[in-house]
């Protein structure tokens, strides 16, 4: 990089913190977050998301943290890594992104570059964010300041594919800025970069990555529904089909998290805005969104076959994070399973050794138990944590209990049914 670089990373969550840490090993970096508790925790040298180790935090010698906008005025690269969720009607909620753009706009100076990493629909950076940057800075886009877009590819809980080891797509609002943005990321991304031709292309590339996975998982989820009716085990079918070299190895399950269960709605929103109804994407979303209800109802039917009275029955759900070996509970669809049991007046205990009790209570209104008891009428294995592989889950249920394995983690001889 020829120019002096001083970076501000806006948002210190699962995406922003690992990025700030890597940049902080080479450049002066200020990590900005509106959550004072989060900033205090990082200043104390610990990341509760476990995405970044204490040693890595200590190694980022040029990184400091703040909640004050005054501390980021002297930066010249602003990287926005805030969440882009959906609302209760499954529409894009750009509130965090727009608020972050306002914040950056208030400190933006001539020749500064604002890079967005948050997942959006194609065109959102220029249509939604740039006008706010112009409004609050009084500067002109592509004359006084510039933008880049480099979609995040963080995989929470993955200690192999970490931020520097995942190839990075980059882009800029002018060819010169695109080169600057690409060079900036090249300085830390050992896996290399791919410079897209425009902001919109980079935005679209990100949103289709997770839409593609969503559709593939919806396909195997539908296969699971069909094979259940036929009376064959889905995991065994997939194992047999997977012996062909070009068979895509996806597995059925609950589709949650901050990406796969959310991003397709950003693409479909833009398509519908332009007058096109995206049939395949929305069909996949509907199917995946209903899997939690399917699992609970299948378990209830199995309980009834064994003579259980459902109202007042005791059910244990193992796991509430959206994926295994990770404390991330964002958009976990395990809550759909829990709520369906509750609608049938079952008493549900939820155990997860990875999840934070206070966070789960705040987000879902669920009180996690410290340890499971025994004599449950049904046990549902919802998340494939390593701890559960080593646990005799049958010890949690009585002789006539129903055991349902959503993840296909256990041998089919140990459970009544696998998804």
Image: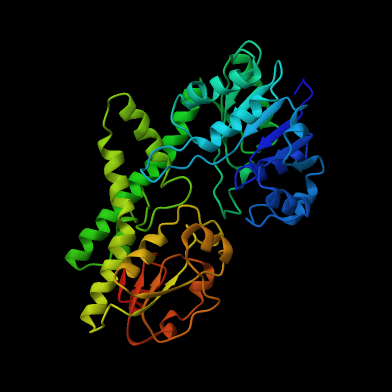
Q: Residue furthest right?
A: 61
Residue 176 at x, y percent in the picture: 63, 15
Asked if residue 151 shows in the view, the reply is no
Classify residue 170 as left or right of residue 346.
right
Residue shown at 29% from the left, 48% from the top: 286
Q: Which one is nearer the viewer's eye here, 261 or 385?
A: 261
Image quadrant holding the C terminus, namely: bottom left
On the image, which quarter does residue 110 sit in?
Answer: top right
Q: In the image shown, does 396 or 171 lie closer to the viewer?
A: 396
* Colour logic: rainbow
Residue 68 falls left or right of residue 166? right
Specify the farthest residue to the left: 230
The residue shown at (64%, 30%) is 103
Q: Residue drawn at (53%, 68%), measured in percent from left and top?
A: 386
Determine whether 282 is above or below 387 in the image: above
Q: Quadrant of the N terminus?
A: top right
Quadrant for residue 209, please give it. Answer: top left
Q: Which residue, as the protein is rendered here, is positioned at the far top?
A: 143
Q: Position of residue 274 (x, y in %)?
A: 32, 23
Q: Nearer the viewer, residue 323 or 258?
A: 258
- The front one of 69 and 13 is 69
Q: Position of residue 388 (x, y in %)?
A: 49, 73
**Quadrant of residue 64 in the image?**
top right
Q: Is residue 61 above or below residue 134?
A: below
The number of numbered badges drawn on the structure is 0
Q: Can residue 145 be seen?
A: yes
């Amino acid at each position: 990089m020829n120019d002096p670089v001083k970076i501000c990373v806006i948002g210190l969550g699962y995406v922003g913190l690992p990025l700030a840490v890597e940049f902080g090993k080479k450049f002066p970096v200020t990590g900005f977050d509106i959550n004072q508790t989060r900033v205090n925790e990082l200043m104390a040298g610990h990341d509760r998301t476990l995405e970044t180790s204490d040693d890595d935090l200590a190694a980022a010698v040029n990184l400091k943290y703040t909640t004050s906008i005054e501390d980021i005025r002297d930066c010249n690269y602003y990287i926005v890594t805030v969440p882009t969720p959906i609302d209760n009607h499954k529409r894009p909620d750009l509130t965090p992104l727009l608020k972050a753009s306002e914040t950056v706009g208030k400190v933006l100076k001539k020749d500064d570059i604002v890079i967005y990493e948050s997942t959006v629909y194609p065109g959102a950076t220029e249509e939604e964010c740039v006008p706010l940057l112009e409004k609050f800075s009084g500067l002109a886009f592509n004359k006084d300041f510039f933008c880049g877009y480099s979609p995040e590819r963080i995989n929470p809980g993955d200690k192999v594919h970490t931020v520097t080891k995942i190839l990075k797509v980059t882009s800029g609002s002018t060819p010169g800025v695109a080169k600057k943005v690409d060079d900036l990321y090249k300085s830390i991304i050992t896996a290399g970069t791919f410079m897209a031709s425009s902001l919109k292309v980079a935005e679209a590339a990100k949103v289709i990555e997770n839409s593609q996975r969503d559709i593939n998982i919806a396909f195997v989820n539908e296969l699971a529904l069909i094979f259940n009716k036929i009376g064959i085990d889905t995991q065994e079918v997939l194992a047999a089909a997977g012996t062909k070299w070009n068979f895509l190895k996806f597995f059925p399950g609950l589709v949650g998290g901050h990406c796969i269960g959310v991003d397709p709605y950003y693409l479909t929103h833009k398509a519908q805005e332009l007058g096109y109804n995206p049939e395949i994407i929305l069909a996949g979303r509907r199917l995946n969104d209903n899997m939690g209800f399917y699992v609970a109802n299948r378990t209830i039917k199995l309980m009834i076959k064994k003579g259980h009275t459902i109202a007042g029955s005791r059910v244990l759900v193992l796991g509430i994070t959206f994926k295994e070996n990770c404390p991330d509970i964002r958009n976990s669809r395990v809550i759909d399973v829990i709520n369906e049991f509750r609608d049938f007046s079952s008493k549900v205990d939820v155990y997860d050794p990875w999840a934070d009790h206070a966070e789960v209570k705040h987000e879902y209104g669920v009180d996690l138990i410290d340890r499971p008891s025994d004599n449950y009428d049904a046990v549902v294995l919802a998340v494939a944590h390593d701890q559960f592989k080593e646990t005799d889950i049958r010890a949690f249920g009585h002789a006539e209990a129903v055991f349902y394995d959503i993840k296909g983690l256990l041998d089919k001889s140990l459970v009544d049914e696998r998804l």
